[in-house]
Image (spheres, helix red, strand yellow):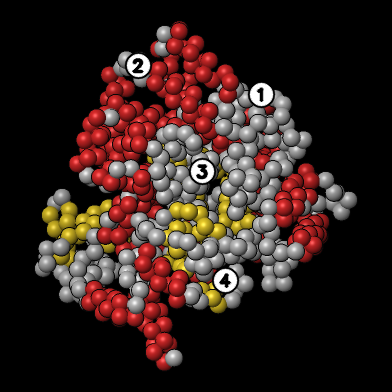
Amino acid sequence: MVNQRSSDQDLRRLAEAHQVAVEFLDWRKRRVRPSPETLRAVLGALGVDASSPAAVREGLREAARRAELPRLPPVTVVRHGAPLSGPPGARVVLETPGGPRALDPEGRLPGDLPLGWHRLRDVGSGDSGLLAHVPDRLAPPSRVAERRVAGLMTQLYSVRSRASWGMGDLADLAALARFSAAAGAGFVLINPLHATEPTCPIRPSPYLPCSRRFASPLYLRIEEIPEHAALPERDRDQVARLAAPLRAGAGELALIDRDAVWQAKRQALELLRTIPTTEGRRAAYRRFAQREGQTLTDFATWCALTEEHGQMWRRWPAPLRDPRSPEVAAEAERLADRVEFHRWAQWLLDEQLAAAQQAARDAGMPVGVLHDLAVGANPDGADAWMYGHVLADGATVGAPPDDFNRLGQDWQQPPWHPGRLAEAGYVPYRDQVGFWLRHGGGLRADHVMGLFRLWWVPSGASAAEGAYVRYDHEAMVGILALEAHLADAVVVGEDLGTVEPWVRSYLASRGILGTSLLWFEAVADGSPKPPSQWRAECLATVDTHDMPPVPEFVSGAHIALREQLGLLGQEPSEARAELSAKLEAWRRLLVDLGLLTSSASDVAALTAALHAFLARTPAHLVGLALTDLVGERRSQNLPGTDQEYPNWRVPLGDGDGREVLLDDLVTRDDVADQIRAVTEELARQLSRRGS
């Protein structure tokens, strides 16, 4: 027994040495310790042998040896005004175009050094590495400072127009931004537009993309590609014929068919490639390709190889699984035309993404498009192929059981390997963040707690049988803040679920906004939190894409659906009683605040009151879900399901089951009035504070 206890203690010490948490507080604030089997499996995914007591002891000795090795890391992240902590005994200098510059006597960087990326060198060992000089606190853009801003939240694919091809696209985004800006909205928060499979079937989830580094050509508006105007009449007619079956119309809601959309758009793009273009556009394409560099070529090569060898790259011939192999280079040369097609498609996306943001800013939005960065990517996708050297194998990312999902979640995404990512200078992470910040006025980081720790689920285990692995949050958050500073953008972190208490205050201190969800904001006794007690450094919303819209939530239909699918995790009567008590408590508070009359019972009045409540909080950003504004009764996503529910395929509809097309939406005074009511209330609140 003593030996077993000693072995377990050694295993825990080894786990801690590799930043694997040996205990955590769950959503009920109970202390939970992962099993030894879980710790061994997670260590194995990190490349650490913990299969026997002897292996564990050797692992501890190796960890101690590595800790004693003084070396300059590949990236040193230093906050503005903070001293640089280098390896013991190192003599670190800053390398600049004008020559080496010494640090000040306290180890601080020169006061005139701009925030950005630089280089350090240890004059003794000769080691060198990148320096990220990051903001101590991310300042909001001047156009947002001292303001509270309301905006729309929507799943872009669901917002179809009569001109789009079966799903919302970037031209629809520009139109939606112009419409909402006219009512006072300052941003449009959309789902991730990350790259999808280049062949069918295409997975519908925006949060399980093939690559977070690039965008999906599904969102292209074909007719707005300049070469479309130069098509011969016969080819323009062919493009129109490709689009015709996909055009949205009034009537019953039809689910979004991404396969059909891509098959049609791909054929249209092939036609457009045949059109000679101007020297100006050729030069613009060359600049784009040079800026995106080898990573763009790698991504395009993966797309071409997928067309040739199938979507499961782990089943490709072994030499093709390594992007740097000679065999991949030979295949890329053989498939050069297909590689070029996918590089060119990304350029078209770059143009239309920029145009959508420009339309939002031209319409008067202080922020514009708020892009969403998913927490991970598909294990069969481009990122897993391109970045395999910095990803862990043998575990996936998820979340432990919590109040909303009592079974836990496994998102089936390979996690960053913290050590390998640091050794790579955080370049893959930096490039992903920078790409989306370049194309919008801000970024929502899904599951922002992943910059601090991620729930690793070992292969073959249930979502509840995982453990947290910690990351260097100073580096991860610092780089995020730096890229946002360089882009003059805002950052919102989705910090819902199981969160260590200090994380939210840390993010606030760094200028990263959190997310406060109305239904979950409560005081100690469980009653709704009054508006004055809400935090200011957040995006405040009623619900999210993972929750039912207000009409569905209020009716309790989501309880019946989750019960039917075996996802409820509690007795239905208990869930309904909890919902009834929650709604009654909220109605009482809204009546007390004068936002709802005691006689009001319809969902529209309740929705308006909830939005008015958000405006009474001090939240910097207030998000209005478009589904709530139009009375939608169906969720976009039901966590825990795959085939049981049409996740991510539901077009925008109203409470009567009719599709709401963008063309009609922008003429609806009721939607504009709801946006305007919130923006005007925000202005009144600001005026009262200033008087």
Question: Which residue is at the front of the view, 447 or 40?
Answer: 40
**Mark 3 sits on what residue?**
206
Disc 1 marks a residue whose amino acid type is: Gly
Label 4 close to label 2 by CB (< 8 Å):
no
Instruction: Pick whichever, 472 or 320, lies toward us.
Output: 320
- Label 2: which residue? 274
Q: Position of residue 180 (x, y in %)?
A: 61, 35
CA gap, disc 1 and disc 3 = 24 Å
Q: How crowded is mark 2: few (under 14 residues within 10 Å), some or many (20 or more)?
A: few
| Picture layout, residue 55 above or below residue 490 | below
Q: What residue type is labelled 2?
A: Thr
The answer to whether the residue labelled 4 contacts the one labelled 3, judged by CB atoms less than 8 Å apart, is no
Q: How crowded is mark 4: few (under 14 residues within 10 Å), some or many (20 or more)?
A: some
**Image quadrant in which the N terminus is located:** bottom left
- Residue 230 visible here: yes
Residue at image mark 1: 249
Residue 664 lies in what quarter of the image?
top right
Q: What element carries label 1?
A: loop
- Per the image, label 3 sits on a secondary structure element best described as loop
Give the vertical position of 7 relative to 166 (above or below): below
**Mark 2 or mark 1, which has the lower sequence index?**
1
Q: Between marks 4 and 3, how big is the CA–CA gap?
A: 27 Å
How far is the residue under mark 4 from the one under mark 2? 58 Å
Q: Mark 4 points at which residue?
A: 26
